[in-house]
Image (tube, rainbow, N blue to C red):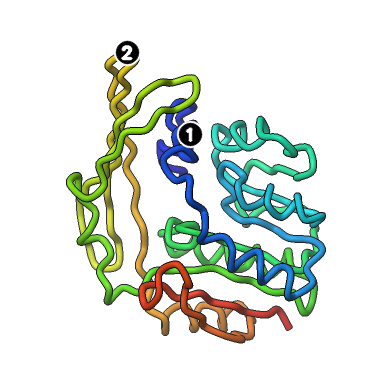
Amino acid sequence: MADEIFTHPRLAALYDPFDPDRGDLVPYLDLARQSGARRVLDIGCGTGVFALLLAERGIDVVGVDPSRASLDVARAKPGAVRVRWLCGDATALPPLAVDLATMTANVAQAIAAPDAWEGTLSGARAALRPGGHLVFETRVPARRAWEEWNREASLREVDVPGLGRVRGWVELTEVAGPLVSFRWTYEFASDGRTLTSDSTLRFREREEVEADLATHDFTLQEVRDAPDRPGREYVFLARRP
């Protein structure tokens, strides 16, 4: 199930304003260009930022996400008609035969349940043509990123079109082994309303991810460092034989 930040229409509208700098997507765009990908599957496309960047470059894009509210935001953006939007997940896709499948930002970690993760890898492999690639990132558990998830470090106020001034922050709620849970709180100045969104991410060790890829018949080609978070993330590039 998607978190409230993706499923509640008012919260889905906050996602882009609260995260306007998407420099983390540049390496994915570079990979698509370098690999000569002509058709891309964006798993967990959310509000469509990456899918639309690809479409602007003439790439045929399929964006899939379980949140209808996020897809509504995506579909309302300029150029959205160039993307095929699917409401769902990677476990129930139509035949695609894409050159590249992506899971940007927190998407891979947000698929926390083991069965859902296994199904996602299986679905991604089935969607790829032989020789196609899968790329995704995950935080390095040893860096304990969650220690920085607190109100003091994250508090921001943003003017959101159509909603006015919104104040938001994140707070850690639980660490249970590889599962890290946190809560976003948003206060709307226009009507005094407060909404929250709870999320859980799974912090997988590199060896665990490599084993999962091998189990699903992917050939791991490279584990890269994330340029925007050096030493803090793994970027996995795998190939379907």
Q: Is residue 192 left or right of residue 212?
A: left
How far separated are the C-alphas under marks 1 and 2? 18 Å
Q: Nearer the viewer, residue 212 or 191?
A: 191
Residue 172: in sight, yes or no? no
Q: Is residue 136 left or right of residue 233?
A: right
Q: Is residue 67 left or right of residue 178?
A: right
Q: Residue at x 54, y 68 (%)?
A: 136
**Which image quarter is the C terminus in?**
bottom right
Q: Residue at x 34, y 38 (%)?
A: 197
Q: Residues within 10 Å of mark 1 (few under 14, many from 20)?
A: many
Query: Sequence-wise, which precedes: disc 1 or disc 2?
Result: 1
Tell me where residue 230 sits by quadrant: bottom left
Numbered tag placed on residue 234 in the rendering: none
What is the x, y in percent for residue 44?
57, 52
Q: Residues within 10 Å of mark 2 (few under 14, many from 20)?
A: few
* Labelled pair 1, 2 in contact (Cβ < 8 Å): no
Q: Is residue 55 left or right of residue 162?
A: right
Numbered tag placed on residue 191 in the rendering: 2
Q: Residue at x 44, y 64 (%)?
A: 114
Tell me where residue 215 sits by quadrant: bottom right
| Label 1 residue SS | helix
Q: Nearer the viewer, residue 175 or 155?
A: 155
Amino acid type shown at disc 2: Asp
Q: Nearer the viewer, residue 70 or 179?
A: 70
Q: Is residue 13 above or below residue 140?
A: above
Residue topped by disc 1: 12
| Label 2 residue SS | loop
Q: Is residue 131 above or below residue 194?
A: below
